[in-house]
Image (cartoon, rainbow, N blue to C red):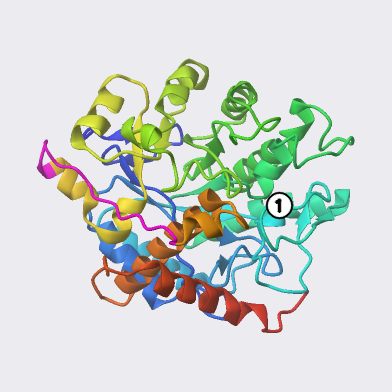
Amino acid sequence: MSNPLDLPCGLRLPNRITKAAMSEALAGSDNAPNEQLAHLYRRWGKGGYGLLITGNVAVDRTQLGEPGNVVIEDDRDHDALASWSKAAHDGGTPIFVQLNHPGRQANPLNLGHTPVAPSAVALAMPGAATPRELTDTEIEDIVDRFARAATVCEAAGFDGVQIHAAHGYLVTQFLSPLANLRTDKWGGDPERRRRFLLEIVRRTRKAVSPGFAVSVKLNSADFQKGGFTEAESRDVVAALVNEGVDLIEISGGNYESPAMSGSAAASTRAREAYFLEYAASVKGIAGHVPIAVTGGFRTHAGMDSAVRSGECDLVGIARPSATNPEAAADIFADEDAELKTHEISYGLRPLLGRVADLKQLDGLLNISWNTDQLHRLSRGQEPDLKRGPIKTTLTMVRRNGRFTFGKRRGL
């Protein structure tokens, strides 16, 4: 794990542990990076990681997954973005910006806002609005937005971008036969459903310099009956390799079926790396393109074995880094090291289970709990491991609620 890794674009990662993306929700009302983000990444930059990947950065300020998303539409925030990238580089760590569009997973508490998606299929979650189907012109505009945002990131000193094609966001919606019911050039069969992602990668790769990394976060599957399958995912990997990507990170699930969160079954967590078997199955397809796996890694032994065996090239750490920003350094320092995570769940389960999907609720609760920890770290505070579900829920509603009733341009 301590060996460096050279990406196809020429960028050298100093080791094989990545701080995977977690949405920070730290931007202000102007959706610009700020000193809190810089402070957080300065701390992670000194945490021993070989690569840092930011949380959701939106390419359209009228379509946000949550309040506090950084938005990159043009170079208006160049100086703030440059400070963000420098904060990571101060610790000697490369940094990628995760570019994203929420599609139908736009903030559910933003009442009155109609999200957009490949088709008018609502998210199967309480309170989800039915999205409006995107026109061909709008789809082309979104593709261009990803490419434009990548050029801004390169100018601001970042080392690469990651296109978010996992966890149920817009790119995943195009890939999914459950969410994409189109019959035009953007849907109708697996080849056309992956066109949106491939066009984003193609135009992004063309827009940036050869030494700037273009990577993709991809679901192994969405774990829903009739949904995006491992077989389709393998075909997407093969297509991405042909488009010249520099890194593919494997994850899985979405907010309807949250395999990527702490709500995974105990038997799944016991395997430590949730998606490693799938990753090993695409290594031959990926060829010279490195494969990263995020989800479940907790021990030095598990991470080292995954890399040494060749099942993956990098391991991603997400939730442990929310409470331990030096998680990677701790793993390298001790062969017996095991990272700790904290999981909480709602009470009154028999009653609550009658009206809601407990797996979904607990998944969202744990995501919010970790976001709260990131906010503490960004203010120079230490994590609050005793934070319970009630306080976490109130913070989640308050964080989203300030966005709910505010006026935003373009809505």
Q: Is residue 249 above or below residue 31?
A: above
User: In terms of secondary structure, what is the magenta stretch mainly?
Assistant: loop
Instruction: State left or right for residue 187 relative to residue 172.
Output: right
Q: Name which quarter of the figure residue 6 lies in.
A: top left
Quadrant of the snapshot with the N terminus: top left
Quadrant of the snapshot with the C terminus: bottom right
Expressed as whole percent of the image width and height from the top left, the position of residue 373 reads 34, 67
Q: Which residue is mark 1?
A: 123
Expressed as whole percent of the image width and height from the top left, the position of residue 368 reads 45, 64
- Identified by mark 1, the residue type is Leu
Asked whether residue 343 is drawn in magenta, I would say yes
Q: Is residue 398 above or below residue 124?
A: below
Span colored in magenta = 333-347
Res. 157 in view: no
Badge 1 marks a residue whose secondary structure is loop
Instruction: State left or right for residue 48 relative to residue 292.
Output: left
Q: Is residue 235 above or below residue 21?
A: above
Instruction: State left or right for residue 36 relative to residue 233.
Output: left
In percent of the image, x 67 and y 62: which residue is there? 106
Instruction: State left or right for residue 328 relative to residue 173.
Output: left
Q: How many marks?
A: 1
Res. 21 in view: yes
> Between residues 246 and 403, which one lies in front from this camera angle?
403
Expressed as whole percent of the image width and height from the top left, the position of residue 398 reads 52, 79
In percent of the image, x 30 and y 70: which residue is there? 377
